[in-house]
Image: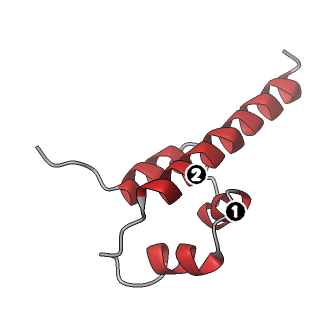
Amino acid sequence: MLIKSYKKQLLELAYKNQIDMKKAYRLAGIPYSSYHRNFKTNPEVEISLPNALKVAKQIEIMNQNIFLEKIKENGM
């Protein structure tokens, strides 16, 4: 069985609401250089587990905020 990379898992989390990965990194307190190394250079560079967890948490927060905004828009 092939285990998904952290990068692929983060992209899947962000896909539904089209979360900007650069913004998620920034809000998670991770330097731009890490984002650039993980997403803008050699595709084989993997995200460290601590950074992946921070970004995943931030993506979840951003997804929740989008969900709450959609609820407010629909008057629920």
- Looking at the image, which residue sits at the far bottom? 41
**Which x, y percent locates residue 32?**
64, 77
Q: Are marks 2 and 1 in contact (CB under 8 Å)?
A: yes
Q: Earlier in the sequence, mark 2 or mark 1?
A: 1
Nearer the observer, 51 or 69: 51
Circle 1: element type:
loop
Q: Amino acid at mark 2?
A: Lys
The residue under label 1 is: 29
Kindly indicate the quadrant of the structure image that contains residue 26: bottom right
In the image, residue 43 sits, relative to residue 73, either above or below, namely below
> In whole angstroms, how far apart are the C-alphas of marks 2 and 1?
8 Å
Please give left or right for residue 23 compared with residue 40 in the image: right
For image coordinates 54% across by 75% down, the residue present is: 34
Q: Quadrant of the N terminus?
A: top left
Disc 1: CA contacts within 10 A as few (<14), some (14-19) or many (>=20): few
Q: Going 44% across and 48% down the picture, which residue do you hit?
A: 12
Residue 48, x across and y down, in percent? 42, 62
The residue type indicated by label 1 comes to Gly
Q: Residue furthest left?
A: 1
Residue 54 got which mark? 2
Question: What colouring does the structure picture have?
Answer: secondary structure
Q: Position of residue 66 (x, y in %)?
A: 74, 38
| Residue drawn at 64 percent across, 74 percent down | 31
User: What mark, if any, has residue 71 been given in the picture?
Assistant: none
Question: In the figure, 47 relative to 11: above or below?
Answer: below
Q: Residues within 10 Å of mark 2 (few under 14, many from 20)?
A: some
